[in-house]
Image: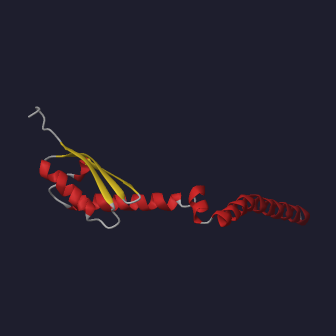
Amino acid sequence: MKTNKALALAAAAWFVAASTTAWSQPGEAVSASAGAQGASGIAASGAMAPAGRKADRALRRRVYAAIGKDKEISAGDISVIAKDGAVTLNGTVTEVAQIGKAETIARGVSGVTSVTNKLTVKKPFGGM
């Protein structure tokens, strides 16, 4: 019984050691090439991409929340796309004045570098 446990532990230890070595090799190659290429090597390898997407999502939520705080604008009909500080507003509002107001609110959010406003006025039922 003790021999079986010892063999199982030895096999598990070998497996962990082999897995660790196999997983560390690609990382070593990336870090070596990143060291040779500098920061551009890291960006090209995609190492910065998850942090960028996270920042884009956070900015999108902040812009959407800021627009949602304004009681005159129906934020449910507006979508916000954020990419590296550039924000795009899509969707509809009920009045022309709300288009400019939503853009002004979005520009006031920290982290926003530019705003592309693609909002349109929603026509009421009946086409008038």
> Residue 127, position in %: x, y?
11, 32
Residue 112 shows up from this direction: yes
Foreground residue among 57 and 125:
57
* Residue under the image location 58 percent in, 56 percent down: 44
Q: Is residue 59 left or right of residue 67?
A: right
In which quadrant will I find the N terminus? Answer: bottom right
* Residue under the image location 20 percent in, 51 percent down: 74
Foreground residue among 53 and 10:
53
Farthest residue, direction front: 37
Residue 46 shows up from this direction: no
- Color scheme of the displayed model: secondary structure
Residue 30 picture quarter: bottom right
> Residue 67, position in %: x, y?
24, 58
> Residue 5, position in %: x, y?
85, 64
Residue 114 picture quarter: bottom left
Q: Is residue 73 left or right of residue 116?
A: left
> Residue 98, position in %: x, y?
16, 52
* Residue under the image location 36 percent in, 56 percent down: 86
Farthest residue, direction right: 3
In which quadrant will I find the C terminus? Answer: top left
Q: Is residue 7 left or right of residue 128?
A: right
Foreground residue among 30 and 2:
30
Farthest residue, direction top: 126
Does 126 appear above or below 98? above
* Residue under the image location 35 percent in, 65 percent down: 111
Q: Is residue 83 left or right of residue 18?
A: left
- How many labels, in total? 0
